[in-house]
Amino acid sequence: MIYFDNNATTAVTPAVLDAMLPFLKEQYGNPSSIHQLGNQARVAVEQARGRLAKAIGARSSEITFCASGTEAGNFAIAAALQQAKLAGKLHSGNNIVITAIEHPAVKAAAAWFGKLYDIAVRVVPMRFDKGTVSLAPFAEAIDDNTLLVSVMLANNESGLILPVAEIAALAKAVGALVYCDGVQALGKLPVDMKKLGVDIFSLSAHKFHGPKGIGALFCKRGLKLPAMLHGGSQESGRRAGTENTPGIVGMGVAAEHAAACDTDAVAALRDAFEQGLCARLGDKIHINFADLPRTPNISSVQFKGADGNLLLIMMDQQGLCASTGSACSSGSLSVSPVLLAMGLREAEAKGTIRFSLSRLTTRDEVDRALDAVVAALK
Ligand code: PLP
């Protein structure tokens, strides 16, 4: 099997698994317990928090562990609105601004909480200017009534890297909070909270060779947000519930390794894959978004006139795992709204396959993947 679907999820590395295992076996203490076993777990959780914080240029106190990127995104939007309501600043003229290419975790949460609080959700279209994302539609959408701007750092389907710092500056100028979905960023590009200028940032371990079911939220120091979950005093009272110690430990190690990843080596393999495809298939294919800033691991390829879902099945039969869009929408026959928002026509989006590599991908796998694509097309 050749696994080119690393934006859907990644393999847990042996080092991450080794770090986790003791906390699934003999070191099963509850981090809140004051005996030795509890203390060992507490120390491990705090060590992992420090590792994750270092990997993203944050302070340990700014990190809250949670269950997933989806939970973090839902919380960011709910909390920003709850905070405004508690401060008596929420009124029906308010709005939240999101991009047209956000993950469903953000899009659906914005729609839900926007409706609940009776405020508008402004969806900013993607426009490109000289190979970069144009800021003009953001400047148009953000105004004095904007409570929150939600902009992802790296898009899961196209790999597009968004100018988050510049968009955050527009939001800050009107006093809006900024949430950044960073789930697809760590391990693919430098992530530094000091440079990004956002208030809230989300991560998910299973996207960078950590375990599933563990995520984290960065909340900038000084930012007062309501608790994610109410109950015990875990996570400094920000998210109640007994900590997922093995998951947290795994996430800490995975984050450290992801931050040290040689992204140029991944980009070189991706480029070799794309060159190989072009050499073998010529004008039967088109590499989408190659002229835009994109993460080093992703190749979005249009197979002209083909049905992406059918092609995916054929590739699977050749032992190659890829995807037509985000994992959440695969299985459904609708065309990816993200690809349409990125400027593809319907037929182009339907024939598009997302190949996503990782730092574990080898040159041999690239060669075998090329053979598998050619065989599947036949
Ligand atoms: N945000 C982005 C950009 C994603 O790609 C994903 C997962 O595909 C999520 C959020 C959701 O993360 P999780 O799978 O941890 O819920």
Image (cartoon, rainbow, N blue to C red):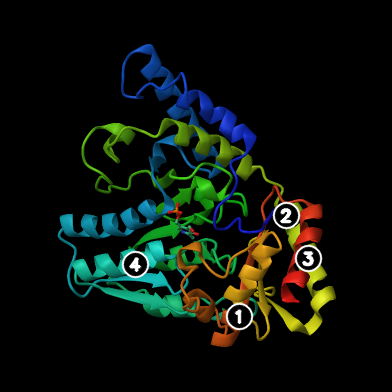
> Which one is in front in this view, the residue at disc 1 or the one at disc 4?
1
In percent of width and height, residue 335 lies at: 50, 79
The answer to which of marks 1 and 4 sits earlier in the sequence is 4
Which residue is at a point 78% across and 65% down the rendered structure image? 370
Q: Which residue is mark 1?
A: 307
Which residue is at a point 16% across and 55% down the rendered structure image? 86
Q: CA distance from mark 2 to mark 3?
A: 16 Å
Q: Which residue is mark 4?
A: 108
Q: CA distance from mark 2 to mark 1?
A: 28 Å
Q: Report the front residue among 281 and 82.
A: 281
The answer to which of marks 4 and 3 sits earlier in the sequence is 4
Q: Is residue 132 visible?
A: no
On residue 266, which mark appears?
Answer: 2
| Residue 2 versus residue 236 in the image, above or below | below
In percent of width and height, residue 224 lies at: 28, 47
In percent of width and height, residue 374 lies at: 77, 71
In percent of width and height, residue 97 lies at: 36, 71
